[in-house]
Image (cartoon, grey):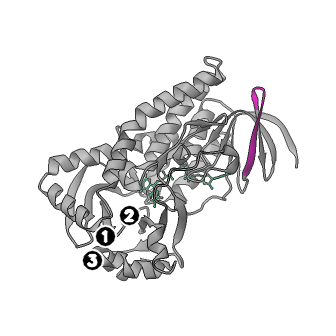
Amino acid sequence: MEMQTEQYECAIIGGGLSGLCLAIQLAGQERSVIVFEKGRYPFHKVCGEYISMESYGFLHTLGFPFEKAGIPMISKLGISSESGFMLNQNLKSGGFGISRFLLDHELSLRARQLGVVIMEECRVNDVKQEGKAYFLQTTQGTFMAKVVCGSYGKYAPQYINEPKSGGDNNYIGVKYHIKTDFPADRIELHNFKDGYCGISKVEGDKYCLCYLTTSRNLQENGKDIRQMEEHVLFKNPFLRKYFLNSEFLYKQPLVISNVHFQKKQTVLNGVLLLGDAAGTITPLCGNGMSMGMRASKLLAVEIVRYLQNQQSAAELAANYKREWDRAFKNRITAGYYLQNLFGKKVTTDLALRFLHNAPALTDKLIGLTHGPAF
Ligand SMILES: Cc1cc2nc3c(=O)[nH]c(=O)nc-3n(C[C@H](O)[C@H](O)[C@H](O)COP(=O)(O)OP(=O)(O)OC[C@H]3O[C@@H](n4cnc5c(N)ncnc54)[C@H](O)[C@@H]3O)c2cc1C
């Protein structure tokens, strides 16, 4: 396989939204950047597609074409229990809905406009360090870079040597795009046994319906998604209504498995990590997309200082870790506690009924999952 002679200042493994946001910021500061993405844009991803408002201004500064996309703004929340109780709350900061199909594609176009080289259908198979240079072996040849960042998402490639996760639940994620009768300014989260399902609008006339549950739930239903939905999700009357009265736009749902939620590291084997690669928390509790975008901003600052010889590689890694912990530690801890309130028949129902009478506390809890603008 061919060895490329050009050395990039930064190589990014994974062109999801964290990697693309980082690439755009670095290229905006005249840095040479290459992104490796194993997929081909545009493509769908399992994601609830609700983005907390904290990222709106940031995406705007990156040049995301909000005006062209027709994005719904979301300011109302409903959370239901399996037995049919619905907690309603206005969202203080709220969010907006964009499909990953559109978001990642538009960001890739913007990155290219700024001179980022994007290698599509190109998987990084190994990264080796020699002196101050990194060599990335990919399905399309070997590339050289001064800094390597990993934004490869939930599944760490083997060469990263990620420590094995400590026995938490193994989840699956399932997503559909649907057409349905639902307010554009509302997001609903519906609990069922060992899981919850979100529904909210994205661009155009589409809605995203996406749920997370344990893989045990699927196994107990003969590994049949439809059977699991009918036997488990339909026990929640709201979900039953949406499943039976909507037009489903994919022939098959998009499904991912082996999903674990944990804090990982911000650097492994010299590779600086961001987005889900640095840690995932359950979607309900943390707005993972905003966390990935915020991390890209923290990391871009440190990489530029390194490339300008204002700090060493060790300082880059240490300063990024410190900033990452400062930005996310509390949010991640809160996320783990909040997670325990959901997906349980009795506890969830009691918690929602209690919160119904305590709107100030509900606001506070929601606030823990939404960060300030950046
Ligand atoms: C069920 C579910 C619902 C969710 N809902 C929401 C929500 O509503 N709102 C929210 O904010 N967050 C949500 N999240 C979390 C959110 O999806 C993630 O936090 C976000 O996608 C992380 O972005 P990322 O860029 O880190 O990773 P990704 O978007 O996963 O991108 C990683 C990219 O790397 C590529 N890649 C991987 N390995 C390689 C390789 N070796 N070589 C080249 N390319 C590679 C992949 O193809 C992929 O495109 C949800 C998560 C789940 C599981």
Nearer the N terminus, badge 1 or badge 2? Answer: 1
Alpha-carbon neighbours of circle 1 within 10 Å: few (<14), some, or many (≥20)? Answer: some
**Residue named by callout 1:** 182
Q: Which type of secondary structure does the marked residue at label 3 adopt?
A: helix
The residue at the point 20 percent across, 69 percent down is 85
How far separated are the C-alphas under marks 3 and 1?
Answer: 15 Å
Q: Which type of secondary structure does the marked residue at label 2 adopt?
A: strand
Question: Which label lies toward us, 2 or 3?
Answer: 3
- Residue 153 at least partly seen: yes
The answer to whether the residue labelled 2 contacts the one labelled 3, judged by CB atoms less than 8 Å apart, is no
Nearer the N terminus, badge 3 or badge 1? Answer: 1
State whether the magenta stretch is mostly helix, strand or loop. Answer: strand
**Residue named by callout 2:** 201
Residue 125 on the magenta segment: yes
Over which residues does the magenta segment extend? 124-133
Quadrant assignment, res 268: top right
The residue at the point 63 percent across, 39 percent down is 149
Nearer the N terminus, badge 2 or badge 3? Answer: 2
The residue at the point 41 percent across, 40 percent down is 57
Type of amino acid under label 2: Lys
